[in-house]
Amino acid sequence: MGCHSEPNREPGYRYHHGRRVETIALEIAQFENLLKCVNVKALRAASLLHDLGKCLPNANGQDHALKGANETRRRLQNQIDQETLNIITEAIAQHNKRRSDLYPSRHEETLIQDADLIDHFGLMEVWLHFYQIAKQNGTIKDAVALPYQEHLQSWHDYAQGSLNYPTSQSMLHARMARSRDFFTLFAQEQRGRIE
Ligand SMILES: [Fe+2]
Ligand SMILES: [Fe+2]
């Protein structure tokens, strides 16, 4: 899957992110005992394709979730059954909406919302943080500066208030602990203090 929005991040970044979202969504579904009541085929396909809209030419500032849903419908129409296609396109369209935005909704939608958020935390968060710093030609000091710490904290708060399942909360907490530990140690080493 080619992508225009993050040209220097990683070749195929959206594909790899999609595969990770698929794995995380399935793991949440398994722990929440939802595998019997979700359309697994649709969940996997929508996870993989959820950010397709980010890889399409930007027209009229349209929401990438809707753009991806429309493109998926166009490409898969007549290839799979209508019910599965509807679940896939709706899950793609809703993937960047949050808990407060929609209810009731299908598990395929809320699982992907959570998995998509979770993939931005933990050691992935460390990678994304340094990617953003480098993209803005930031220094090592910028990487540990107070505005970034505050940004990180508000991002953590936002994620914690947005998840749909207890399993997602546990996964997020484990990841946040890892990234906090990393940034604490990194800030110490940056100052030459290794305690
Ligand atoms: Fe997205
Ligand atoms: Fe995403």
Image (cartoon, rainbow, N blue to C red):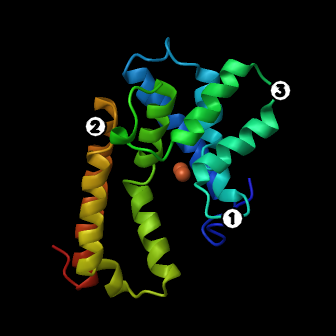
Farthest residue in the top direction?
36
Name the side, left or right, on which 186 lies relative to 97: left
Mark drawn on residue 79 = 3
**Which residue is rendered at x = 32% and y = 44% of the image?**
162
Q: Quadrant of residue 89?
A: top right
Q: Which residue is drawn at 69% across and 27% down?
A: 85
In this rendering, the count of numbered labels is: 3
Q: Which of marks 2 and 3 is nearer the N terminus?
A: 3
Label 1 Cα crowd, 10 Å radius (few <14 / some 14-19 / many 20+) = some
Q: Residue at x 27, y 46 (%)?
A: 160
Q: Residue at x 44, y 73 (%)?
A: 130
Is residue 104 in view from this perspective? yes
Mark 2, residue position: 170
Q: Is residue 63 above or below residue 43?
A: below
Q: Which amino acid does label 2 sit on?
A: Ser
Sequence order check: which comes first, mark 2 or mark 1?
1
Element on which disc 1 rests: loop
Residue 87 horizontal/vertical position (percent):
61, 26
- Label 1, label 3: how far apart the Cα atoms are: 26 Å
Secondary structure found at label 2? helix
- Residue 194 quadrant: bottom left
Quarter of the picture containing the C terminus is: bottom left
Residue at the disc numbered 1: 58
- Image: 28 above or below 149: above
- In the image, 17 versus 74, the foreground residue is 74
What percent of the width, then of the height, locates residue 100? Answer: 33, 40
